Image (cartoon, grey):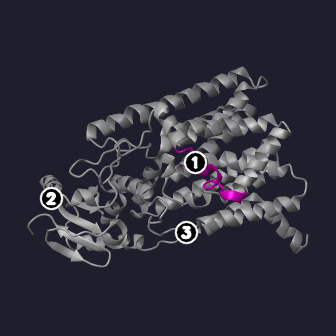
Amino acid sequence: MNFTSGAAQYFKDIRFWIILFFIVRLYGITFPPLEVGHNWRQTDGLMIARNFYERDPNIFYPAVDLGGEKTGIVGCEFPLLNYSVYLVSLVFGYEHWYGRIIVLIFSSIGVFFFHRLIRKYFGESAAFNAAILLMVSFWFSYSRKNIPDVFAISICFIALHFAFEYFEKGKWRNLLLYFVLGLLGCLAKISAATILTVLLIPVLNKENLLSRKVALISFSIIILIAIYAWYFVWVPYLNETYGLAGHFFMGTSFVDGWKQVVAHIDVISKRFYDTPMKYTGFAAFAAGLFLVIRKKHWIVLATFLLPFIGYLLIIIKTGSSIIGDTYYVITVVPCMAFIAGYGLSLIENKKIVTAVLIIVSIEGIAARMYDFRIRQPYKALADLEVIMDGVSNRNDLIAVNGPFDNPTGMYFAHRRGWSLTNEFLADTNNLAEIKNKGCKYIVIVRKLYGDMNLALPKVHESEYFKIYALTDR
């Protein structure tokens, strides 16, 4: 085999691309979670991980640093990713970037199993195309963020593999692995459960043994019961008991959600043709969907529609939240990449296929590059803890200006307290109220959340921060 043919074999092996994308995304892996894209979502999870490490490791009582004088215990997604960061911290000491590397490792394994499943049932070409399109999509940047979505979906890919292995071979080991991984993936992010909906296809297949169907359905019901128990019993209990209801968004009613979706259909529809795979990727998806329907490949269409319809139900449940929280679209990316990849496999001219993959990859990666740089004024927040250590004790309650309940400033201050709007802090009655609750300092993040002057003793002033004492020093 000459060098050219040998290199070609590497390029055709999805493992080469998974490793390459893994290495590329290691760039800046230790950067603080201060990207413009959803830094608040990352710091919220990291608060919980750090509090497991510093305060209480009970996984059933996750706590944030918000909530002022309260304990901070809050209902949220099952904190599997957060607890993983805690477990690594027990060995090496706490660092925020452990979350990034954990998600990156699992997302890479997830792509491997995504490819493996498609290759087994729809062919190598469809699998390769779909895996590449997935890696250059929204997945590219969010598969290295401390956010549970990609992490949970990847676990569900692995669970799906073992479920199909169980249908084929009937080994209880595979069923058990499906159950454990499916349970963990769905608990870590409830929307990841849409990935497992494709199991309806083998369940409805008359050729599969009834006993195996009953066993898999039984274990799946246990997963659903666990999801319900955590999200709809335990989470409300924690929020009501510890007074942080509203911190974790539980969605709205289907009626209200439908009204919100209809009212913002223009913006929400853009989340499908812009955000997941960008414009060229969406064009490949639309073309693939057209070809699948035209050629009447109904199993392929069902494999796409089951998770896609599940995703649409989640969108209705969350309502207009998808407008701001764009990471919600991560759930729909795999099934869109699948249909686009399969559509490309139907094209006989492989030069056209290669050209499409290159074009989609260039646009997809270029559109995410901003997420690999930390810019000012966000970058300045990384210095806030050192500044606060110079003026206050670690156990002092503080308030940071910014969007209400935004955790980013508080996380980098490494203290507990409140995130409050400038309008709130401008009212002296509100200042008196938080002072009575124990607040000792107010941090103004000048260039990020807006500058303001308070009639209070100033203990620090710099380009990016002002710090006021709310109590006699």
Q: Work out whether residue 134 or residue 336 is closer to the camera in this orientation and state it.
A: 336
Crowding around mark 2 (Cα neighbors within 10 Å: few <14, some 14 to 19, many 20+) is few
Residue 299: image quadrant is top right
Q: What stretch is highlighted in magenta?
A: 264-280
Question: What separation in Å lies between label 3 and label 2 (alpha carbons)?
Answer: 40 Å
448 relative to 369 in the view: left or right:
left
Identify the element where label 3 is drawn. Answer: helix
Question: What separation in Å lies between label 2 and label 1 (alpha carbons)?
Answer: 41 Å
Crowding around mark 3 (Cα neighbors within 10 Å: few <14, some 14 to 19, many 20+) is some
Name the residue located 48 percent from the left edge and 57 percent from the top edge: 146
Q: Work out whether residue 258 or residue 472 is closer to the camera in this orientation and state it.
A: 258
Kind of residue sitting beneath label 3: Tyr
Residue 216: image quadrant is top right
Q: Name the residue under label 2.
A: 428
Q: Name the residue under label 1.
A: 266
Q: Earlier in the sequence, mark 2 or mark 1?
A: 1
Q: Mark 3 points at which residue?
A: 370
Q: Which of marks 1 and 3 is nearer the N terminus?
A: 1
Depth-wise, is mark 1 or mark 3 nearer the camera?
1
Question: What separation in Å lies between label 1 and label 3 (alpha carbons)?
Answer: 25 Å
332 relative to 439 in the view: left or right:
right
* Residue 36 disc label: none
Q: Earlier in the sequence, mark 3 or mark 2?
A: 3
Q: Is residue 278 magenta?
A: yes
